[in-house]
Image: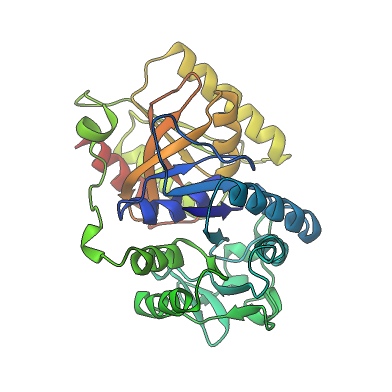
């Protein structure tokens, strides 16, 4: 069984879905306690540490605790999902994962590559780029919570005998890294984003033909029978990419209800709580067929408020946007999709809704 550790909820989804597409039974939970969905025998258990915005020392402890919990649940392989733009406490997360994994594998190492070429994230000559631009010169450099101030991977995460940094500009490069990870054995922790997760899932599966390009099959997979399903979408991300995607969505599908944080976001915790309160009220008093979340903070707080325990991942709506069914709470078994704020083209949300409404 694979244990996947992610620093936020949407990241847990876009990494673990790569395994779900290849037939691995996959469940995502929030918090450090792995959730076993009723009636399931999962191949992948993903937990969320919510430690991106924390300091490295705190992130190290939380990540180590998460991996120890997964090890107690019987995992024999691990994947550490980090932000594809290296935001936040990556250094602490890697240190924590290594510390816990060394209790089983004294020679544990981390093979690190945040590249996700399909989303415009590449690592070239040791520099992290977003659509060809150094990451610190993009909007990520002024991120309101976790700004990235350099594009040099060696400064973001120092290479050492236990930490190996890799370049990757293409999917083929990621497949080469995944092959090295497989050859090195279970002592190596793959550290990356959804791009490396996809490559590793393919190598570990050993059967490329098992990939399920199923999209969002509402009738067979998630039980949505309405020809024009009502969609309630929460957007907690302040990434400019997400804002542009929302504008395009509203123009194309004005019937989709979108809940947004105030432009002057202020305290992120209070904002997430307010969004969760509003979302829960709409869900209680109105009929909805599909729920959506853009941004991990708001998604996590809302799902907790709804009493949910996890999401059983089914597949992808589009690349980088996993979908599944909520487990537990007042929204039990409701269809849901999640997306990282900075992922995708300007029409990404439009394409998601087009797929859902087919």
- In the shown orientation, is residue 329 left or right of residue 149? left
Say which of 296 and 139 sits in front. Answer: 296
- Residue 18: x percent and y percent? 38, 56
Please state if 179 lies on the left or on the right of 161 as rendered. Answer: left
Q: Nearer the viewer, residue 175 or 88?
A: 175
- What's the residue at 37%, 38% (across, down)? 324
Q: Is residue 152 visible?
A: no
Q: Quadrant of residue 93?
A: bottom right
**Horizontal side of residue 271 vs 253, given as left or right:** right
Q: Please indicate, yes or no, whether residue 2 appears anywhere in the rendered image.
A: yes
State the image coordinates of residue 114 (x, y, percent, origin top left).
Answer: 53, 69
The foreground one among 89 and 19 is: 19
Q: Which residue is drawn at 43% across and 23% down?
A: 332
The colour mode here is: rainbow
Front residue of 259/170: it is 170
Position of residue 267 measured from the top left corner of the image (x, y, whole percent): 73, 39
């Amino acid at each position: 069984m694979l244990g996947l550790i992610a620093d936020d909820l949407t990241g847990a989804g876009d990494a673990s879905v790569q395994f779900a597409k290849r037939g691995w039974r996959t469940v995502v939970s929030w918090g450090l306690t792995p959730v076993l969905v009723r009636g399931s025998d999962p191949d992948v258990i993903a937990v969320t540490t919510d430690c991106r915005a924390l300091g490295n020392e705190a992130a190290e402890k939380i990540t180590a605790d998460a991996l120890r919990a997964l090890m107690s649940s019987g995992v024999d392989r691990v994947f550490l999902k980090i932000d594809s733009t290296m935001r936040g406490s990556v250094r602490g997360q890697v240190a924590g994962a290594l510390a816990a994994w060394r209790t089983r594998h004294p020679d544990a190492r981390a093979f690190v590559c945040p590249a996700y070429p399909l989303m415009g994230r590449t690592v070239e000559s040791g520099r992290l780029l977003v659509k060809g631009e150094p990451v610190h010169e993009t909007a990520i450099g002024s991120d309101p919570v976790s700004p990235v101030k350099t594009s040099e991977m060696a400064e973001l995460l120092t290479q050492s005998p236990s930490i190996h940094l890799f370049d990757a500009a293409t999917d083929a490069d990621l497949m080469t890294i995944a092959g090295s990870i497989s050859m090195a054995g279970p002592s190596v922790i793959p550290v990356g984003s959804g791009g490396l997760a996809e490559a590793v899932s393919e190598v570990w599966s050993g059967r490329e033909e098992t990939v399920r390009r199923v999209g969002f099959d509402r009738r067979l997979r998630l039980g949505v029978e309405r020809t024009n399903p009502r969609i309630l979408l929460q957007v907690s991300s302040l990434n400019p990419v997400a804002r542009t995607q929302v504008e395009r969505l509203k123009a194309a599908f004005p019937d989709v209800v979108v809940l947004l944080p105030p432009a002057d976001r202020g305290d992120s915790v209070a904002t997430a709580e307010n969004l969760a309160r509003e979302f829960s009220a709409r869900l209680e008093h109105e009929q909805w067929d599909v729920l959506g979340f853009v941004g991990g903070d708001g998604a996590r707080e809302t799902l907790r408020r709804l009493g949910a325990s996890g999401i059983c991942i089914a597949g992808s709506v589009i690349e980088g946007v996993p979908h599944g069914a909520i487990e537990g709470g007042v929204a039990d078994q409701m269809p849901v999709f999640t997306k990282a704020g900075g992922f995708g083209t300007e029409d990404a949300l439009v394409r998601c809704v087009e797929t859902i409404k087919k």
